[in-house]
Image (cartoon, rainbow, N blue to C red):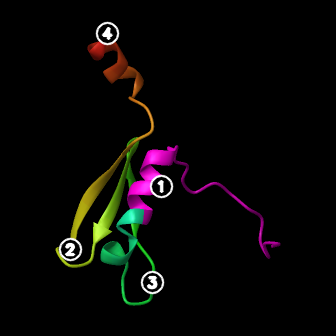
Amino acid sequence: MFAARESATDCRAEVTRDMIELMLSQFDSLSDPEGTIQLELRGNCLMVLNPQTKAYEVVGLARLSPSMRKVIK
């Protein structure tokens, strides 16, 4: 697929297999009537909007932020 405009990175996320499998296993309950899900990236945390509760739920973190890695060590 070719873009009609110059491509620019608006957002970048790291996603693990576990995160994809979690979203896929719950896709029907998390998708809207059109069959799409709304994702949000907060820092390095991937969140998905639950259409029933209108609240964002944590999908996961691909890796800890550098500041958290120092705390966990």
* Dots 4, 3 in contact, CB < 8 A: no
Of 25 and 23, nearer the camera is 25
State the image coordinates of residue 18 (x, y, percent, origin top left): 44, 46
Q: Which mark is residue 35?
A: 3
N-terminal of the pair, mark 1 or mark 2, is 1
User: What residue is rendered at 20% in x and 74% in y?
Assistant: 54
Instruction: Identify the residue position indicated by label 2 in the image.
Output: 54
Q: Is mark 1 on a helix, strand or loop?
A: helix
- The three-letter amino acid code for the residue at tag 3 is Gly
Quickly name the residue at label 4.
Answer: 73
User: Label 4 to label 3, Cα distance in Å?
Assistant: 41 Å
**Which residue ends up furthest to the top in the rendered image?**
73
Q: Give residue 20's mark.
A: 1
In the displayed orientation, state which residue is furthest to the right.
Answer: 2
**Pointer 4 or 3: first along the chain:** 3
Q: Is residue 32 above or below residue 40?
A: below
Q: Which sits earlier in the primary sequence, circle 2 or circle 3?
A: 3
